[in-house]
Image (cartoon, rainbow, N blue to C red):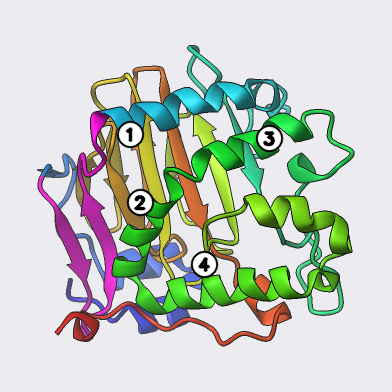
Amino acid sequence: MDWYAAKIYGVFIQDRKEVGLMEAYPPLHEEPYPLQTRPLTIVDKDGNILVWYLPRILFEDRQMAIFNSTSTLEPELAKSFTPEKTSWRTRRSSFLDGKMPGCINMSPAWFQQGHEWYRNELEVSSLLKPTNKNIEENISWLHNMNVHFPIVNSIAQIMHPQQFRIGMEAIDKLHKDPSHLREGNTARTVLDAWHTPFSALAVISNRSTPSHRDLQSPAKGLDVMVTTGTYRDAFMVLPGIGMELYFPPGTVVALSGSLIQHGVRCSEVDRVCLALYMRSAVHEKLELSPTSWSNLSHFA
């Protein structure tokens, strides 16, 4: 890409100058965007890797095991919808019918929405608090996922070694000293079940996702998406780049969620995406260094 990612983020995205961005850095192609079906990376002029695309990298039995495991979370998914005037992420009209539509988030340590500043305490997300009536099922799902997380973790470690290391340092720090969390030692059950370096994860079932940015994700980091299910065709749309990625079951995509506009179009149901993401504010609270870009030089 004929981009300098650091400049784009600093000049355009932080100030939300979408029109100026498209004029200064137009997409490679106009609609209809060309469809990519082979593995690829998208790299800026400094060698920073902004997108990794690994179609069907997970074997069929593994991706189906992940998909089937989400049935444990059906009670949480069913009550995840919000009124139509709220965010597209959770309003009912964003979801297709089918098995278990909905969107939920889990984290062993994050800030309540709107409270991401240094003097506030980290806390376990609501789905993993002892007061949640489905806590046993939610923790059980995390334990069941621990046979799959090592594969995703290995992929994430190759894609962005520094982000992986910092994420592991954060989880290790919480393990050694749960007093960083509002729940203190009572959070050990969650920490013992959390076997990924990411700050949080989302389980997204049967949602049509418009093009967007995830501005809370670190620009230099990578969000990792794993898609599973029995559907046949889905497509990840990258309008700022001018490209579509074929997004069948078993595919893994990692991208800078705050830098790269992305969305998913699919008219088929029985599709679950796991989105694993970092939160810079959590690492800052734990006094860890921010991550730098994943760069081609790391693989020389």
The residue range painted magenta reads 38-60
Residue visible at 89% across and 38% down in the picture: 131
Q: Secondary structure at mark 2?
A: helix
Label 1 crowd bin: few (<14), some (14–19), many (20+), radius 10 Å: some
Foreground of the two, 4 or 142:
142
The reply, left or right, for residue 299 in relation to residue 228 is left
Q: CA distance from mark 4 to mark 2?
A: 36 Å
The answer to which image quadrant residue 182 occupies is bottom right
The answer to which image quadrant residue 285 occupies is bottom right
Residue beneath disc 4: 16
Label 2 crowd bin: few (<14), some (14–19), many (20+), radius 10 Å: few
Foreground of the two, 280 or 259:
280
Pointer 2 or 3: first along the chain: 3
Instruction: Give the amino acid at mark 1.
Output: Arg
Residue visible at 67% across and 71% down in the picture: 282
Q: Secondary structure at mark 3?
A: helix
Pointer 1 or 4: first along the chain: 4
Instruction: Give the amino acid at mark 2.
Output: Ile
Residue visible at 53% across and 71% down in the picture: 167
The image shows residue 66 at horizontal and vertical percentages of: 43, 32
Please state which of the two labelled residues, at mark 4 or mark 2, is closer to the viewer.
2
Residue beneath disc 2: 151
- Cβ–Cβ below 8 Å for labels 3 and 4? no
Mark number, residue 138? 3
The reply, left or right, for residue 24 in relation to residue 111 is left
Pointer 1 or 3: first along the chain: 1
In the rendered view, would you say 88 is above or below 154?
A: above
Pointer 3 or 4: first along the chain: 4
Q: CA distance from mark 2 to mark 3?
A: 21 Å
On the question of residue 138 being in view, the answer is yes
Quadrant of the snapshot with the N terminus: bottom left
Mark number, residue 62? 1
